[in-house]
Every structure is written in C-alpha cells, then in structure tokens.
Image (spheres, rainbow, N blue to C red):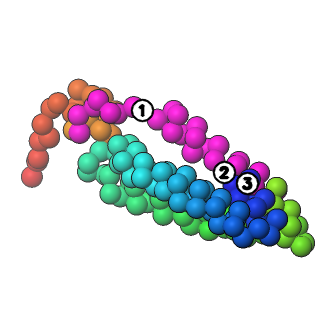
C-alpha cells in the first residue's frame, strides 16, 4: 500500500498501473484465494455458512467507513498519503494476529471442525423428537 499510494502521488501512470496490478492482482487475489478455505475451517459444517457470512458481512460493513476515515486523515488537500498507508497497515494487525493464533486444522477430520472437544466429533448425534 505504501508503494501504491506513493506512485499515485508521483503522477506516474505506468508506475501506478504496475504497482496496482501487483498489489491488487497478486497480493489481494492471494488473500482471496486462501480466505474462504481458512474461514471455513473455523466453523463446524452446521454453522459454516452462517459463520462465514455473518463474519464477513460485518467486516465489510465496518470497512466501508474506512474510506471516510482515510479521507479525513489524508489532510485538507488529500495529499498526505503516508498517513493513509499507515492506517491501512494498522488495519492488517488484528487479522494477522487472528490468523497466527487460529487453530491448525489441516489434519483434523471434517467432523471435528468447529468442535471444542474432539471426542464429541466421534460420537454420532442423537435426534430426539
């Protein structure tokens, strides 16, 4: 983000295009490629769709206000790109901490995903009428 916003401030269209392709075409796409599988593993199959939908939609709703805040910290002329880049970098801290502290599930059976006690996953559910 630092390089991309800096390139916009230079007025160099080729540099902005190149860094835009790198930032959004590679980095952003990589995160979008990993995200659905990563988020899906955090929930049991019964709550997966709701868990992912509610979590991402709340995040998108809150993130919508980031543009307004970024416009405010960019200064009266909108040329303080470094403050906006620092704000963007700060927004990466909570998700990075969450990802690093998330439970690793690549060896867990599907039935055990989202279950606090792994022994519960091996016992069949009983349906009572």
Q: Earlier in the sequence, mark 3 or mark 1?
A: 3
Mark 1, other Cα within 10 Å: few <14 / some 14–19 / many ≥20: few
Is-magenta flag for residue 96?
yes
Mark 2, other Cα within 10 Å: few <14 / some 14–19 / many ≥20: few
| Mark linked to residue 3 | 3
Q: To which quarter of the image does residue 77 belong?
A: bottom right
Which residue is most to the right? Answer: 76
Residue position marked by numbered label 1 in the rendering: 103
Q: Is residue 72 left or right of residue 4?
A: right
In this rendering, does residue 2 appear at all? yes
Rendered location of residue 32, percent (x, y)? 46, 55
In the image, 127 versus 114, the foreground residue is 114
What segment carries the magenta color? 83-110
In this rendering, does residue 39 appear at all? no
- Looking at the rendered structure, the secondary structure element under dot 1 is loop
Q: Earlier in the sequence, mark 2 or mark 1?
A: 2
Is-magenta flag for residue 40?
no
Residue position marked by numbered label 2 in the rendering: 91
Q: To which quarter of the image does residue 63 belong?
A: bottom right
Q: Is residue 57 left or right of residue 84?
A: left
| Mark linked to residue 72 | none
Rendered location of residue 99, percent (x, y)? 51, 39
In the image, 55 versus 33, the foreground residue is 33
Observer-side mark, 3 or 2, equals: 3
């Amino acid at each position: 983000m630092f390089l991309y916003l800096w390139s916009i401030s230079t007025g160099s269209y080729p540099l902005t295009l190149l860094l835009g392709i790198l930032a959004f075409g590679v980095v952003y796409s990589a995160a979008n490629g990993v995200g659905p599988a990563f988020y899906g593993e955090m929930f049991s199959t019964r709550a997966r769709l709701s868990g992912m939908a509610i979590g991402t939609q709340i995040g998108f709703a809150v993130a919508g206000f980031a543009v307004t805040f970024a416009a405010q910290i960019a200064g009266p002329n909108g040329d303080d790109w470094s403050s906006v880049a620092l704000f963007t970098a700060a927004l990466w801290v909570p998700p990075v901490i969450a990802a690093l502290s998330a439970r690793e599930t690549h060896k867990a059976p599907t039935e055990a995903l989202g279950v606090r006690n792994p022994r519960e996953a091996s016992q069949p559910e009983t349906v009572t009428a």
